Amino acid sequence: MVIRFSNLYSRLVFLLLFFVLFFNNGRSVWGMNYTKYRKVGTLRLSRIQKHLDNLNKPPVLSIQSPDGDIIDCVHKRKQPAFDHPLLKTHKIQRVPPKMPTVKSMVKTQEEDPSGKSANISQNEGYIRRDAWQMWHQNGKKCPKGTVPVRRSTVHDVLRSNSLYDFGKKRRSNAPLARRADAPDVVSGNGHEHAIAYTGTSSEIYGAKATINVWDPKIEVINEFSLSQIWVLSGSFDGSDLNSIEAGWQVSPELYGDSRPRLFTYWTSDAYQATGCYNLLCSGFIQTNSRIAIGAAISPLSEFEGSQFDVTIVIWKDPKLGNWWMGFGENTLVGYWPAELFTHLADRATMVEWGGEVVNSRANGEHTSTGMGSGHFAEDGFGKASYFRNLEIVDSDNSLISAHDISTLAENNNCYNIKSSSSSQWGTYFYYGGPGRNDQCR
């Protein structure tokens, strides 16, 4: 389905939303039960609409996704990245960078470390080429010279605490009790992790891993569950931490549903004022016309059934210094320009892989929001979620197996992690858990 909008149509939508939100007390007439908020005044609504008018660039083409998303095909030079003051004169990197050296894969059938067939495809993980994002299912695609951008709506903004908070990770002021050598990328109570991490190093120029995709249960709207790679540099105790992140995430507050979605994040000041999820602020420059950041991933892994995974790599272009993101074995998504960062303008000093959830303790007890598949690591293949083939990029732009990793989980009774290695999966780990249970209160 192809949709074209005029300015008059946008204004009519604005008026319709005002009446719906004001007189319907925030309940959508379309039955979406994730959005609950107070009546919205005209001043606030006009501020939100002004922000969205700036964020949602005029599309060349718009595509309706089966999951309800609208994907706007925006001209590359018109995408949100170029609103950033540091990128006003930035020219899109037209010559693709050389991807880090990838080990050749001969077999199309591998076994997981437990000996059970994992049915891993050589180039696509378990993701079928025609079904790795839901918006592709209707056969439409963005024209050459454009990039797909998930359209943001008034409902999306109203689910956040404020317009300022929209699209940003929240950082609590209360520090977590953690070992000094196990930094947390979002310091504060309420965030729980099961992660593997490298020791501090001066020779990290990227990271890679393959992650299987699930749809964990989320208990309350302002909680999320994600599985991602963090590429880090700077101080974990100060305000200058630089972080580049990518993976999959379930976040009803951010997306309005419980589907797992491909996401990115960046910050250059420890999640204070800079950076955001996906393309919800200026920064990340997208170059791919087939992958929409923030769009739903499909198909998903099934308990004791088919397993589907995605491969993500983040690395620094040795020539120009931009930090690129790859999806699958050889697909470039886009890049974070070097101008955005301080410490990462040089190199990374640490990598983390793993899961994170928000535990809001809404009812005075631990959340039942799941991490990964919602099952503990010891349940193994087909039941627990995994990261496999953990690798880092060295100064020669080569991938090397991440042998010397440590693991950490704040509360093993809620979420845990178990790492190992094999000839086929390299360094890997299972992780996750159900949250609240008899031993996790």
Image (cartoon, grey):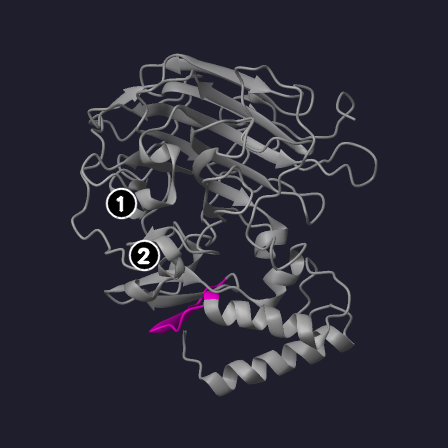
Q: Is residue 327 visible?
A: no
Position of 219 with respect to 250 (left or right) is: right
> Is residue 156 covered in magenta?
no
* Residue extending furthest toward the right: 364
Which segment is the magenta one?
A: 55-66
Circle 2 packing at 10 Å, graded few (<14), some (14-19), many (20+), is many
Q: Is residue 2 above or below residue 71?
A: below
* Quarter of the rendering occupied by the N terminus: bottom left
Q: Residue at x 67, y 70 (%)?
A: 44
Task: Specify the label residue 290 is tagged with.
Answer: 2
Residue type, label 2: Arg
Circle 1 packing at 10 Å, graded few (<14), some (14-19), many (20+), is some
Q: Is residue 53 visible?
A: yes
User: How far across and down, in percent of the image, does residue 423 sit?
Assistant: 31, 15
Q: Which image quadrant is residue 60 in?
A: bottom left
Q: Is residue 103 above or below residue 50?
A: above
Q: Residue at x 73, y 70 (%)?
A: 40
Q: Are marks 2 and 1 in contact (CB under 8 Å)?
A: yes
Q: Nearer the viewer, residue 124 or 402?
A: 402
Residue type, label 1: Thr
Q: Which residue is mark 1?
A: 331
* Quarter of the rendering occupied by the C terminus: top right
